[in-house]
Amino acid sequence: MAAERTSLVTAVVLLLGCAAPPTTGLQVVVAPHSAAAPAWLADPSVGDRARTTSEIVVAAWHAPARRLDGYTLTLEAGAGTLDCGGTPATGCTTVAGGGGGTIVVEVGSAACVEVTVLAHELGHVALAGDSGHADARWYSADLGRQVAQALLPTVPAEDGPCLARLRELEASAVYMISWGNGV
């Protein structure tokens, strides 16, 4: 397992070192929000960071980056919870029959996009059809640790709160079922 973790982190670092543009068709939308929203939501790099995070997380779930093609990710702030098919949630993913769909994330007071419930929602993209969280990876502390380790090198050094939260997630090895839900 340690070799897989090291390989994933190495692959991500090498990929990002090339500074290639995003390779997926994921569209990122920042919904209008109040001044009380986290400042990072207004950062012009938030779309690129969300796409990079998405590619890394989908790869950690062992799905190809092209699985993101046709998806629209909407980052919202201020609602607290979303209506996800009649259930209150902080994230909601709808998978379209022919590929693509929507991912909506309520960012709450998260330190950055990397530590929102996005990583959990991407599990629904990678494991299309597993809305009930039956796959064992949802409960894998190793996967949570791998995701945190893979995301750490992508966060700018000046983003201390984000790096600190990722390090906490790495150390606690949070399960993907709980990622971004205040755990």
Image: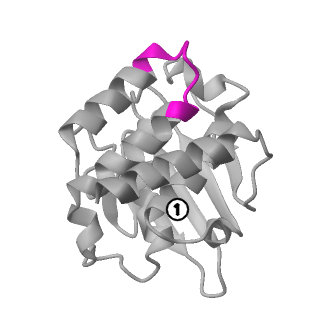
> Is 138 situated above or below 54?
below
Q: Residue furthest front?
A: 3
- Where residue 115 appears, as percent x and y from the top left, is 41, 37
Q: Which residue is nearer to you in this view: 173 or 16?
A: 16
Magenta part of the chain: 153-161
- Where residue 55 appears, as percent x and y from the top left, is 60, 55
- Where residue 122 appears, as percent x and y from the top left, is 47, 61
**Residue visible at 60% across and 87% down in the picture:** 97
**Residue visible at 79% across and 45% down in the picture:** 20
Give the left or right position of residue 166, taking residue 53 as reference: left
Give the left or right position of residue 168, taking residue 127 as reference: left
Which amino acid type corresponds to the residue marked 1 in the rendered image?
A: Ala
Q: Is residue 40 located in the magenta-colored stretch of the structure? A: no
Q: Is residue 157 located in the magenta-colored stretch of the structure? A: yes
> Is 171 situated above or below 51?
above
**Residue visible at 70% across and 30% down in the picture:** 45
State which quadrant residue 92 falls in: bottom left
Residue 90 shows up from this direction: no
Give the left or right position of residue 1, taking residue 60 as reference: left
Residue 112 shows up from this direction: yes
Q: Which residue is nearer to you in this view: 30 or 153?
A: 153
Q: Which residue is nearer to you in this view: 140 or 16?
A: 16
Other-residue count near label 1 (Cα within 10 Å), few / some / many at <14 / 14–19 / ≥20: some
Which residue is disc 1 drawn over? 59
Give the left or right position of residue 151, taking residue 146 as reference: right
Q: Which residue is nearer to you in this view: 146 or 128?
A: 146
- Where residue 11 appears, as percent x and y from the top left, is 57, 51
Where the N terminus falls, by quadrant? bottom left
